[in-house]
Image (cartoon, coloured by chain):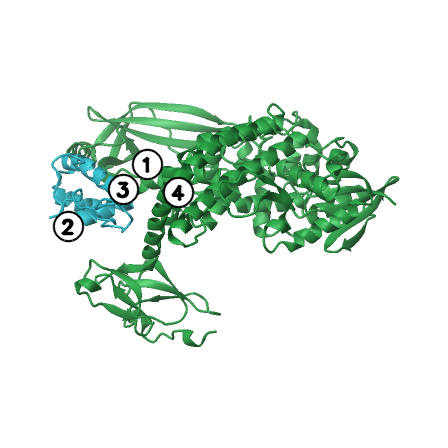
């Protein structure tokens, strides 16, 4: 008997959708490796089949490793990526199941990627069913939302969104593959060596932003200046006081201020009291959730995204890949709050909002998303115990949602101006919360800082109990962290809400950047400086930003996909022609850089004997054994040290606390990484049992 | 005594990065800035060139390339250039 085939993005979503639409009467059966769910809804026979995310990808149509490549098409991932045969079998199963279907429904996540996943499968694996398929539109995986989405499904697929996704994938491929190939090919032609080097439409401008910050930090020259530190005694307690000038460029002048005011009496010239009103926060879009989760829990953006997706699949929160800061009434805010009111953790706060008697109007931001509302809880309590990180993120989302309904918070800000002598003014600032408002709901995530100062009046005398001079130096700009770079990417329209965290992960994976306070590595600096020299347009935000806007226009239906691709190719073709002209130069430059990096990797540290040479790992020509030697050997430095002969050796930036010589990492098969000082007579090694790396297999 | 702008070698004297000059472009720029800021230190702290280099190389806020170039200038005994950036 023919059935309706509902296609989902992932197995976990398929299960949720099946149970929601079948009201529990569902038969689960594996066809090959694919879990399928069959049930009746009214008279309709339904089969729910999951995908595994993207099953199709962009592929070069012609054969060979050429550059530049523009002839592209879509093919199963199993034909393109090694080790993805499972995907091929998955597609074959869907094809087989599609033969018995009389209608098709896409129930993939309602966004660009989800729409594209379903479209490709329906078009290629279901015999062109994309033309007659329907689309379920939902923002949460709750029963109510899913049933409503099924009952009111769209009669066609969302082709504008699909086209935008398709164009984005195709242009990313053309940019990424061509530039990466140009780099690798240029290097290989000149040197015969192969190194994986990559560049991308979004990746390169992002790396360029990090690179510029790295330059600013590494080239920073601190300038000296002086600040006046002071303490004023108010009502028997001491409070920090700020001098009227934040920086003083002369030490003498600063010392004169300290000498004039230290221990002297001052007079309160004026007392300014203001009330600061702090409105409730906006509900979360993905970017603000990622930034807030980093601020509060130090979760990386990709971790936050993964955790949020898990919460969404558990029907605990709405779809997280959204850029909306709106909570429309159609969401049923009252019923969400009523459900939350029944929970032990949020019952009190939710009940207060419901019983306040005011209309349920959350504070909203200006950002919108045509597909989804802001991230919000569904009101459902977790069925199983959540992991610690999942629970923390869930708690943050629920409390943020509740806070948006809260009252304004207010603070009393007091500024006391103290005159000491004729010319010296100091300021004591106080801050106290007069009304908690929304901050109570958002506790402990709202940052409440209080400095309560006693009530004083103008004309009262004050003792400047201590006034001193502090030496300071100008500081460089801070390093980006995953949260702040994500914000910059968002502001420059680099990548999409769904891809930004992945792009950052790629930069880490490629070893172009490292650390939580992001540092651009030597490899990242070198690749980027070559890109800036030979492909400057690709490192600038403008081109990528324009394409981002074009894709938004495709999604809105105001621009044709072909027009966007043609325009992009028109810009890219002359660029690639120039690359071909510069091929030898690029290759030579890359070779120099790669050799430099190789040499640098081999340097362990400075030679303690001659002080000017570098200690490197040297292999004996006679025995083939390795040892530490000095790069000044040819100039007469004979410093050397033995090294373990087995295990993979890696230099670290650290030096031994006991003897000051470099520390290396040695990884032997089956052993954990061993960190040891290269000095065989180091005092830290007395009585130490070293692993017998010789015996490892 | 060495003048960093006269040497013609293939690698930076400080980091061994490929370069057409004695210093790579990063260390060249760091040297230019080092010289430029000396005026501020001289005026505010009354430091000699040598004291300035010591101060810069031991300062926590100093950028890595500027520190390296200051240490290099101390080691090579590079005197204060007559004109900033000369």
Q: CA distance from mark 2 to mark 4?
A: 38 Å
Mark whose residue sits in front, 2 or 3:
3
Check the image and report above or below for A541 versus A316. Answer: above
Q: CA distance from mark 3 to mark 4?
A: 22 Å
Q: CA distance from mark 2 to mark 3?
A: 19 Å
In the picture of the structure, the residue carrying the numbered disc 1 is A239
Q: In the rendered image, which quarter is residue A248 located in?
A: top left
User: Pointer 4: residues within 10 angstroms few (<14), some, or many (20+)?
Assistant: many
Do callouts 3 and 4 point to residues on the same chain?
no
Q: CA distance from mark 4 to mark 1?
A: 66 Å
Q: CA distance from mark 1 to mark 2?
A: 50 Å
In the picture of the structure, the residue carrying the numbered disc 3 is B25
| Host chain of mark 4 | A
Mark 2 secondary-structure assignment: helix
Do callouts 3 and 1 point to residues on the same chain?
no
Name the foreground residue: A189 vs A23.
Answer: A189
In the picture of the structure, the residue carrying the numbered disc 4 is A583
Residue drawn at 35 percent across, 63 percent down: A664
In the picture of the structure, the residue carrying the numbered disc 2 is B76
Provide the letter of the chain coloured cyan.
B
Q: Chain A rendered in what hue?
A: green
Q: In the rendered image, which quarter is residue A134 located in?
A: top right
Which tag, 4 or 1, sits closer to the chain's start?
Answer: 1
A276 lies left or right of A328: left
Residue drawn at 64 percent across, 40 percent down: A317
User: Pointer 3: residues within 10 angstroms few (<14), some, or many (20+)?
Assistant: some
| Host chain of mark 3 | B
Mark whose residue sits in front, 1 or 2:
2
Mark 1 secondary-structure assignment: strand
């Amino acid at each position: 008997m023919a059935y309706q085939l509902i296609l989902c993005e992932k197995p976990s979503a398929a299960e949720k959708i099946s149970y929601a639409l079948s009201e529990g009467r569902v038969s689960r059966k594996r066809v090959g490796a694919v879990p399928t769910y069959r049930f009746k809804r009214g008279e309709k026979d339904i089969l729910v089949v999951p995908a595994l995310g993207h099953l199709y990808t962009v592929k070069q149509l012609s054969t060979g490793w050429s550059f530049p490549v523009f002839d592209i098409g879509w093919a199963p991932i199993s034909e393109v990526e090694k080790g993805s045969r499972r995907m091929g079998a998955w597609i074959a199963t869907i094809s087989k199941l599609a033969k018995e279907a009389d209608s098709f429904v896409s129930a993939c996540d309602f966004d660009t990627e989800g729409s594209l996943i379903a479209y490709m499968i329906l078009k290629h694996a279901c015999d062109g069913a994309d033309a007659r398929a329907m689309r379920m539109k939902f923002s949460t995986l709750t029963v109510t939302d899913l049933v409503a989405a099924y009952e009111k499904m769209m009669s066609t697929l969302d082709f504008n969104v699909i086209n935008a996704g398709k164009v984005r994938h195709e242009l990313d491929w053309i940019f990424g593959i061509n530039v990466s190939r140009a780099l690798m090919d240029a290097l290989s032609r000149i040197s015969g060596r192969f190194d994986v080097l990559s560049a991308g439409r979004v990746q390169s401008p992002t790396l360029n932003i990090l690179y510029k910050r790295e330059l600013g930090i590494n080239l920073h020259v601190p300038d000296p200046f002086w600040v006046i530190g002071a303490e004023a005694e108010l009502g028997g307690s001491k409070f920090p006081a700020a001098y009227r000038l934040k920086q003083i460029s002369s030490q003498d002048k600063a010392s004169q201020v300290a000498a004039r005011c230290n221990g002297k009496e001052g007079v309160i010239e004026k007392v300014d009291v203001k009330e600061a009103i702090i409105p409730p926060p906006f509900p979360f879009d993905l970017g603000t959730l990622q930034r807030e989760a980093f601020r509060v829990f130090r979760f990386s953006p990709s971790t936050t995204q993964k955790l949020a997706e898990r919460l969404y699949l558990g029907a605990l929160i709405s779809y997280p890949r959204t850029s909306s800061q709106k909570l429309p009434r159609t969401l049923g805010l009252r019923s969400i709050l009523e459900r939350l009111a029944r929970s032990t953790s949020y019952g009190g706060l939710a009940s207060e909002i419901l019983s306040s008697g005011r209309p349920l109007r959350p504070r909203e931001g200006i950002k919108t998303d045509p597909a989804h509302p802001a991230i919000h809880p569904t009101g459902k309590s977790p069925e199983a115990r959540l992991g610690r990180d999942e629970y923390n993120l869930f708690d943050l989302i629920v409390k943020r949602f509740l806070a948006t309904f809260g009252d304004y918070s207010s603070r009393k800000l007091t500024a006391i101006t103290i005159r000491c002598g004729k010319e010296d003014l100091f300021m004591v600032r106080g801050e106290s919360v007069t009304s908690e408002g929304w901050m109570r709901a958002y506790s402990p995530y709202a940052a409440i800082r209080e400095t309560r100062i006693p009530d004083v009046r103008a004309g009262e005398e004050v003792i400047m109990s201590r006034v001193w001079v502090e030496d300071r130096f100008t500081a460089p700009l801070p390093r980006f962290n995953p949260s702040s770079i994500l914000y910059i990417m968002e502001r420059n329209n680099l990548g999409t809400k769904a891809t930004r965290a992945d792009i950052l992960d790629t930069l880490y994976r490629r070893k172009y950047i490292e650390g939580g306070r992001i540092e651009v590595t030597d490899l990242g600096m070198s690749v980027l400086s070559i890109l800036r020299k030979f492909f400057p347009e690709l490192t600038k935000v403008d081109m990528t930003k324009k394409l981002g806007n074009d894709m938004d226009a495709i999604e809105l239906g105001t621009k044709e996909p072909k027009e966007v691709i043609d325009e992009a190719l028109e810009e890219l073709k002359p660029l690639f022609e120039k690359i071909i002209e510069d091929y030898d130069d690029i290759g030579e430059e890359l070779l120099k850089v790669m050799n430099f990096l190789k040499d640098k990797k081999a340097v362990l540290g400075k030679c303690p004997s001659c002080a000017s040479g570098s200690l490197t790992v040297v292999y004996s020509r006679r025995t083939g054994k390795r040892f530490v030697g000095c790069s000044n050997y040819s100039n007469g430095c004979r410093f050397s040290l033995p090294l373990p002969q087995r295990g993979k050796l890696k230099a670290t930036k650290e030096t031994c606390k006991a003897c000051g010589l470099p520390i290396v990492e040695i990884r032997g098969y089956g052993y954990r990484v061993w960190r040891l000082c290269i000095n065989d007579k180091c005092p830290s090694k007395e009585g130490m049992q070293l692993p017998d790396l010789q015996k490892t297999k | 005594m060495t003048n960093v702008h006269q040497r013609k070698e293939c690698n930076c004297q400080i980091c061994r990065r490929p370069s057409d000059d004695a210093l790579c472009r990063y260390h060249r720029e760091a040297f230019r800035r080092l010289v430029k800021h000396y005026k501020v230190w001289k005026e505010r702290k009354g430091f000699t060139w040598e004291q300035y280099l010591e101060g810069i190389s031991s300062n926590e806020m100093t950028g890595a390339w500027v520190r390296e170039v200051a240490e290099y200038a101390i080691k090579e005994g590079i005197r204060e250039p007559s004109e900033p950036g000369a």
